[in-house]
Amino acid sequence: MKQFTLGMIGLGTMGRNLLLNMADNGFQVTGYDKDPKMLKKLEEDGKAHDLKGFASLEDFIQSLELPRRVMLLVPAGPIVDSVIQELVPLLSKGDMIIDSGNSHFTDTSRRADELSKQGIHFFGMGISGGEEGARFGPSMMPGGDKQAYNAVKPILEAVSAKVNGDPCVTYIGPGASGHFVKMVHNGIEYAMMQVLAETYALLKHSLGYSNEQIYTTFDKWNNGRLKSFLLEVTKDIFKVKDPKTGNLLLDMIKDEAKSKGTGKWTSQVSMDLQLPIPTINEAVSTRDLSKFKSLRVALSKALPHQGEAIDHKEAFEVQLEQALYFAMIISYAQGLHLLEAASAEYKYELNLKEISQIWRGGCIIRAELLEDIYQAYKKNPELPHLFSDESIQHKLKDIVPGTRHVVITAIAHGIAIPCYASALTYYDSLRTANSPLNLTQAQRDFFGAHTFERVDEEGIFHADWNSTN
């Protein structure tokens, strides 16, 4: 029987496209799926490489070279555990399992511990880029068992996206670091998508732009410093017509956003680590708020707001471009700061320079800005925060006045801009040397005797707040 270098379990769009990518790069690969339609689709799409899959798990496992390299691309959650339970009796010590779905990092840690006791190598790997990325070059974030990673490193580097010749994959770190970094990547993605949605609202309702004008504006911006995958696909949305009505398809889509949970996980872990990511949190909350459609419709009639017209539209468009660039910087900054905190807490040994490097290509949050972020961490790997970099500081100083004007205008017009507003407040909070939170500590000590620290001497203190003195 022909022996294969790697086998894929799960031949949906992502798994199938990744196998085709591997075959294009000269690797002998195969797949397994319970659905005969998926096996047939793999055979049809992989005809040039005589690519075939297996309907029998036992035959699939026996077809793999030793040590066996088995990659999973199945839905996160109980299905992953179910597949692993089926696999383990068929594997030998030294074989490896690579979970490439969007598993929660705590599940990855548990699975790695359980499998290591049985002599099976395991690591989690986040993949970003969607179906096109999987087919032609994704960004990949593998973390965990380094011995297992090294066994598939040549394959991953070959199929990954490339930027300036550099593969957009690197060993992230021990434990569940790969899935953790992918989770935060998705949190940043949530924030960027919401900021683009708020920009759309401002162009449409504050400036009164038509769909064609919005397309032209986004297209112009995407040819400048805002060039990114998300802006590119966003502008293209404004060209797609609905075949049923002839209207712009976007105008026929209900304004209720759904999610698969990775943004929520990012917000939850930020609370656990006490590391603020307010713009990402607002993006998660806004998707949830969008689900209250009937309530929103009713309140729009009961609580109407009439904003003033904008006189200088061209100037406002310039300021809006600045605000969008500002919010993009903030989104990355918050995600990277969370990664730094997680690295210390979970001992992930994350290298933010390498992470920003592999995000430059293949992934959903790839953008021109990431080159500047990569250079910032390359210059100073110990950077305490992205705002600490001088070149980033110069960018922020240049664009914050325009950002303030955009936020003020949106508020005056009654247009909800949760991510823009939180991004600006986050910036202002971090650059405030003396915050009003001394009052919060005084309040806590007044009603709960929670104590406080002083600015003029070391120690922990409690005051008699009811004293007349």
Image (cartoon, helix red, strand yellow):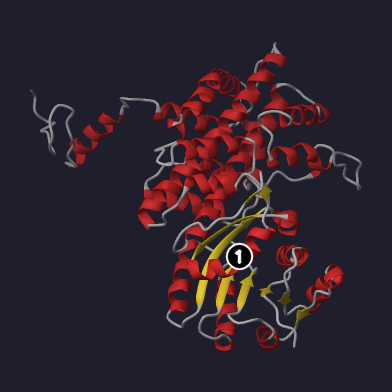
* Rendered image quadrant of residue 261: bottom right
The residue identified by callout 1 is 100
Tell me residue 291's x, y (percent).
63, 48
Q: Secondary structure at mark 1?
A: loop
Q: Give me the residue at 61% from left, 75% from top.
A: 69
362, 333: nearer the viewer: 362
* Rendered image quadrant of residue 149: bottom right
Disc 1 marks a residue whose amino acid type is Ser
Q: Give me the residue at 42% from left, 31% from top.
A: 388
Vertical position of residue 249 compared to residue 344: above or below: above
Q: Give me the residue at 76% from left, 27% from top.
A: 220
Query: From where the camera sits, is residue 257 visible?
Result: no
> The N terminus appears in which quarter of the rendering?
bottom right
> The C terminus appears in which quarter of the rendering?
top left
Q: Give me the residue at 52% from left, 50% from top.
A: 184
Left or right of 192: which side holds 246? right
Vertical position of residue 123 compared to residue 364: above or below: below
Vertical position of residue 39 compared to residue 344: above or below: below
Tell me residue 432's x, y (percent).
37, 25
Left or right of 113: which side holds 87? right
Tell me residue 103's x, y (percent).
55, 64
Q: Dot 1: within a 10 Å radius of its alpha carbon, few (fewer than 14), some, or many (20 or more) residues? A: many
